[in-house]
Image: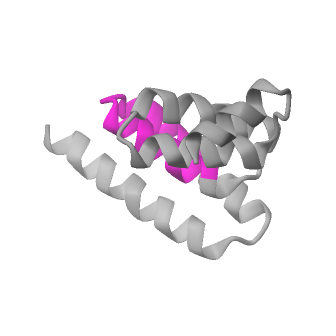
Amino acid sequence: MLESLEKMLAQGMDNALLRFGLGKGYLDAGEFARAAEHFQRCVEHDPNYSAAWKLLGKAQLELGDRQAAERAWQQGIAAAQDHGDKQAEKEMTVFLKRLQRQSSAD
């Protein structure tokens, strides 16, 4: 699947959905830096793509960048609130609170 998505990207078909698919594929494969790159491009295409913000935060957390994960989830919560995505808002709020508790415990 990743190979065909990469081919589409190489052919100039760059959009939020394609970047989300690539990000999700690389996240699932454990390639967190590549995942984060594609999720970042996804939210540049569509700043209201709350699912991309959520997974961008996860990828950044896996890379050990807690501050970037926190920023992604904060932006994702705002995006979810803007378009009524209650589930994504709830999930990212939980992730953010958990991260903040971990940070204060360290």
- What residue is at 50 percent from the left and 28 percent from the top? 34
- What residue is at 44 percent from the left and 44 percent from the top? 27
Query: Is residue 102 at all visible to an observer of this figure?
Result: yes
| Left or right, 50 with reference to 48 | left
- What residue is at 71 percent from the left and 32 percent from the top? 7
Q: Magenta region's main secondary structure?
A: helix
Q: Give whichever of 76, 36 is nearer the camera.
A: 36
Q: Quadrant of residue 67?
A: top left
| Left or right, 94 with reference to 92 | left
The x, y position of residue 31, in whole percent, is 40, 33
- Tally the marks: 0
| Left or right, 7 with reference to 37 | right
Q: Quadrant of residue 44?
A: top right
The x, y position of residue 17, in whole percent, is 75, 49
Q: Which residues are magenta?
A: 52-75
- What residue is at 41 percent from the left and 49 percent from the top? 28
Query: Is residue 73 at all visible to an observer of this figure?
Result: no
Screen quadrant of the C terminus: top left
| Left or right, 2 with reference to 79 | left
Check if residue 61 falls in the magenta segment. Answer: yes
